[in-house]
Amino acid sequence: MSRPTSAPDRITTPISGGVGASPPRPDGTLKVKGEFAYSSDMWIDDMLWGATLRSPHPYARINSVDLTEALKVPGVHAVLTHDDVPGQMLFGLEHTDQPVLAVDIVRYQGEAIAVVAADHPETARRAIAKIVVDYDVLEPLTDMEEAVHSTDAPTLHPGGNVVRHLPIRRGDQEVTAPVVIRGEYEVGMQDQAFLGPESGLAVPAEDGGIDLYIATQWLHVDQKQVAACLGLPPEKVRLTLAGVGGAFGAREDLSMQVHASMLALRTGRPVKMVYSREESFFGHVHRHPAKMYYEHGATRDGKLVYVKARMFLDGGAYASSTGAVVANAATLGVGPYEVPNVSIDCWGTYTNNPPCGAMRGFGAVQAAFAYESQMDKLAAELGLDPVDVRVLNAMSEGTAMPTGQIIDSPAPVAELLRRVEAMPLPDAAPTDSYDLRQLPGGVSNTTHGEGVVRGIGYGIGIKNVCFSEGFDDFSTARVRLEIIAGEPTAMVHTAAAEVGQGLVTVQAQIARTELGVERVTIHPADTQVGSGGSTSASRQTYVTGGAVKAACEKVRGMVLDLARERLDIDGELRMEGGKIVSDRLGVLAAVADVLGDDAIDETVEWRHRPTEALDPTTGQGFAHVQYAFAVHRAVVDVDVDLGLVRVVALDCAQDVGKAINPDAVVGQIHGGSAQGLGLAVMEEIQVKGGKIRNPSFTDYLIPTILDMPPMKVDVLELADPHAPYGLRGVGEPPTISSTPAIVAAIRAATGLAIARVPVRPEDITGTA
Amino acid sequence: MRLRCKVNGEALEADDVWPGESLLYVLRERMGLPGSKNACEQGECGSCTVYLDGVPVCSCLVAAGQVEGHEVTTVEGLAEGERLDPVQQAFVEKGAVQCGFCTPGLIVATHDLLERRCQPSDPEIREALAGNLCRCTGYEKILDAVRLAADRKAAS
Ligand code: FES
Ligand code: FES
């Protein structure tokens, strides 16, 4: 091959759509055309439909299950119970404690007992209705504090009713302070309410294995659990990610994966399962409800001396990720503040309530509602401004967490607070407005402004990013570079789940930047490549992004070696604009000329820096990889006569380290803030006696476009030196801080001491 | 029963339709048009919105039999080949799509809004789209997309 093809000054055209740009999503066009294939859209000739029989009781012994009549329904191909589970009877993320299908006992309302495959979904549902189960109904255990402390509560699992107790002890445990603020706080059970229901297609394979097309957050952890329950080697359980209609934590645990596979293996036919919205409320875990007792000690100037807290998180019938949720609630339990002396105890419990596990914010949401409410109380007690009291106590780089971990990257807590404070406020409350749409109650025509008061409140949240406590948290990326139609084209292949957040966009951006090529394709996520880890803990851009970057670097190194060899030169080279470039000599060759017909295909496993386990008696240890912060200011109008709230403005400042895709970052902040608004004023799964009373979008309300105010978003980029590109996880922090900000604003408007979310009208009118 | 109707301009037929099936089910499972989504199947989320004889409806609430002899337009029928409808184009450009499960319903609802009102105010947009739930976006970028589509439509 010849020597330099161009003069040094003939520089390449820069690649667009790299890191820091906001190219459109690669799947956006398919999605707007209705052509993107979600897990519930899967369709194959000859497929059957699955349905699930679920327990109507929160706690009962099963005496017998009679399938006779169900099997007689024409069109039914299989009816299976726990007797038909081919492998391990139990599954679970941290503890394998949940039966695939109930064995002799049900521990929550909605627990799966039997599954049916039939030629039409309605046939399957009718067959389900014909299964006769004889129960001995038992008194459910529904109080989380009783689960921990009561000696006569039933023991729901062999190890007792405590999934995890984590104490945190730091500093002087006997310390006192001149100002003492106490509070009791409650958080209701929130649902992730993704729009795409649990669904998927299981196709039996010729090798006796199964091909599963599903929506999940972590293909490989599903594969491991499904294979164990089917009694198959993992390589015979092949998963491909179907389109995911949102996740927010609710797809970390298995739902229909094993059931559909069992039915497919039994019938020898593909089986599709799609949960209805009602079933979805029973088909996934929820956010842990919490009861929290806090005591803050401070000086008369408002400087925190100590925080003591007891926190209870109701894990419901099965453990799911309760242990990790406990760790977050406890370790983040004082918030982003300097607190020299800390004593926290946090319990995650088993009860007969619906199982709870991961939801965006994961333990940090519950804690933030309590510690931010306490900060407002402290400010009120001392006559201080709520922002000033927070700034006075704000942590910063170098601060020791309650775990003893020193914050070793930027923690711009005070700056974020000041930035949000400085944002312009919305116009004053309408006093004579008859545009009902601008008033609490909206077009229900409940007020024309009378009884409406305005309030402003602030909230700040802290969240750990990536998996913690010594977990081996890695991702795998395969990158292939080859010349297609004369153009260098990179293909990125990972098993990381795109759930809507935009990971596919980010992966392509990283490949463009690292390889200097325009054309990047994203291979569908599947288990043919190593694990990508979970799409949770705000970790995918960090960890899978890190893996893609590392794989690209390896590919680049090989291309440049090849270039040195083929062009017969030494020294530093770069890949840029599809060319091989030297600082000294300028453009040397097109990548296409160097690579020719060769393809470079490399797979890299990448890990973030290691963390360590927490000491089980003191909760001390370097447990978290990274911390992220967001601040909200909420402005609300409250109709005090009817207890109706309208959030008028919800502004946010968040540090993201480096915005890999600024538009997507802002989109995450918008969406996260909306879920926090939901928890503040409307979202609660109402559970009475262990039973869900509102399993529908008619009765479980999520914010509509009328409920959401305009949001101003200020994105700060202070690089974390430990992270790829300096980035910080983005998805969760805004969900954490918006809830306490809105409640603070409601308190400011009404003067009420509100201590529970969601805030219901009766909490405001005093008729609760 | 046999069902005959016109979908996206094409005369279609479905056999063995059970009378309890919804229009949404028939579109998705019998006519190969899964673009309309099934987020609640109880009329609360708008993800299944289609035009029935030019009027937007929740197809999950329409019994299949009611469509006999009528005309349906789904999200799949809005683009002209590779050329996106301006509403679709604006949703892509403005980042109004995350998971996208709400998107088909919002596209149809927005399309209808802009047919009726070419320069809607923000409160009008919010009112018109109040029946379409989105769990991912917080709606800000959806508003951006609707405004952009409206501006482009007004300019054209
Ligand atoms: S699926 Fe029809 S309104 Fe939700
Ligand atoms: S983009 Fe996911 S529901 Fe709207």
Image: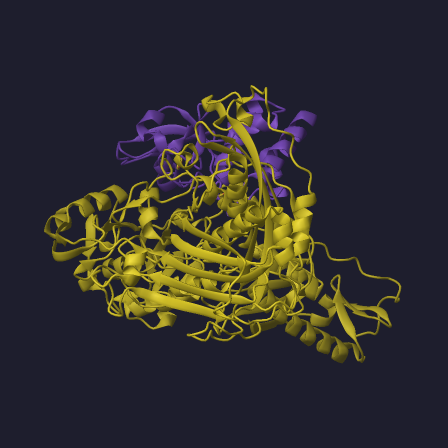
Along the viewing direction, whichever of A449 and A117 lies nearer the viewer: A449
Residue A553, image x and y in percent?
A: 66, 71
Along the viewing direction, whichever of A667 and A640 lies nearer the viewer: A640
Q: Which chain is purple?
A: B
Left-right relation of A75 to A202: left
The outermost residue toward the front is A178
| Quarter of the figure that contains the C terminus of chain B | top right
| Quarter of the figure that contains the N terminus of chain B | top left
A368, above or below B148, in the image:
below
A494, above or below A443, in the image:
below
Q: Residue A511's image quarter?
A: bottom right
Residue B19, image x and y in percent?
A: 26, 32
Residue B86, image x and y in percent?
A: 61, 34
Q: Colour of chain A?
A: yellow
| Picture residue at 50% right of the left edge, 29% below the top | A440
| Picture residue at 64% right of the left edge, 74% below the top | A554
One can see residue A208 in this view: no
A404, above or below A142, in the image:
below
Q: Residue A326's image quarter?
A: bottom left
Quadrant where ligand 1 appears: top left
Residue A275, image x and y in percent?
A: 33, 47
The image's colour scheme reads by chain
| Picture residue at 68% right of the left edge, 58% below the top | A19
One can see residue A10 in this view: yes
Left-right relation of A516 to A107: right
